[in-house]
Every structure is written in structure tokens, then in C-alpha cells.
Amino acid sequence: MNTDAVGEPLKLLLVEDNDAHAEMVKRSFEQHKISNQIFHVDDGQKALDYIFCEGQYSDRSKYPRPNCILLDLRLPKVDGLEVLRRVKADESTRKTPVVILTTSAADRDIAQSYEYHANSYVVKPMDFSKFESLMEDLGNYWLAWNQNPWR
């Protein structure tokens, strides 16, 4: 079980509209005991509400600040690039690591993500074993090994 320096469980916000992809991420992280708490939302507006503690996500005791955000780009309501832009533009959230996890390998998406200060850009492999290995590596790096300001 991973915890931060003060013993709090590590928290991951997974922003993914594809239920199968979300389930693979959750299973992989649980299997490798990478994150103690995974909070999943399935559209960009819910992501913003969660991140900024608004609407149905206004109770921080139930919906804690994430240590890391895994963000898909192609989302309903508000696209992932706009979510990223808002997160990184706000002083209260800009230090939260945001990892783009998407099927898009388009140069434009990659360039725009880094222009909006994504911490990493990862293309989802289609092969399940490669996807699972990637999730283990990502989880270990961003939630266990990387030092961030919320620890």
C-alpha cells in the first residue's frame, strides 16, 4: 500500500469516458497496489467539478484533492485539453501532475498538451499486456517515486 510522507493514502483522479479503459486502469493499479484511492469521472465537466470542488464534488472529505490526474483528451461536455488548460491556469491546482493518457498520437494534440503544461503525454497501447505494464510504470512513477508538492 502506497502512502505519502504523512501517511495519507495516495489519490488518483482518472478522467476517462471509455468504461473498458477505465476498468483496465483501475484493475492494473489495484493489482500492483499502486494507488490506494482511485476516483473516476467520465466527462470533462465532472473532472472540473471534482478538481475545483464544485457541484456534487464539493465535499473534500469524500472527494479529496488528487495526487495525480490521468486525463483522456477526447471527453464529452468539456474536452481534455480544456480541462488541462484550466487546471494549469489556476494557482490552486497548477502543481498537480497531469498525465495525458489517450489513444491520440497526433502531433497537434501532443504539442497542445505540452503548451498547456501537461506533465507527461502517453499513448495507450492497444495490447492489454502492454497497457497493464504501462499502468504499472506510470503508477509507480507518478504516485510512488515522483515527489510532488502535496506530499
Image: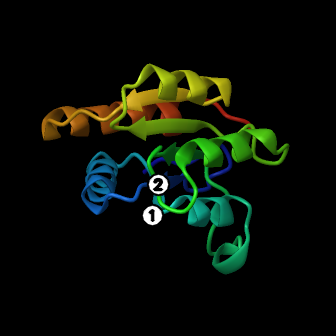
Picture layout, residue 80 above or below residue 145: below
- Separation of disc 2 and disc 1 at Cα? 8 Å
Foreground pick, 12 / 51: 51
Picture layout, residue 8 above or below residue 142: below
In terms of secondary structure, where does tag 2 sit? loop
The dot on residue 75 is: 2
Amino acid carrying label 1: it is Asp
Q: Residue at x 81, y 45 (%)?
A: 90
Q: Residue at x 46, y 59 (%)?
A: 38
Number of marks in the rendered image: 2
Q: Position of residue 66 (x, y in %)?
A: 61, 53
Q: Is residue 31 visible?
A: yes
Q: Position of residue 114 (x, y in %)?
A: 60, 24
Residue position marked by numbered label 1 in the rendering: 42
Amino acid carrying label 2: it is Leu
Q: Is residue 150 visible?
A: no
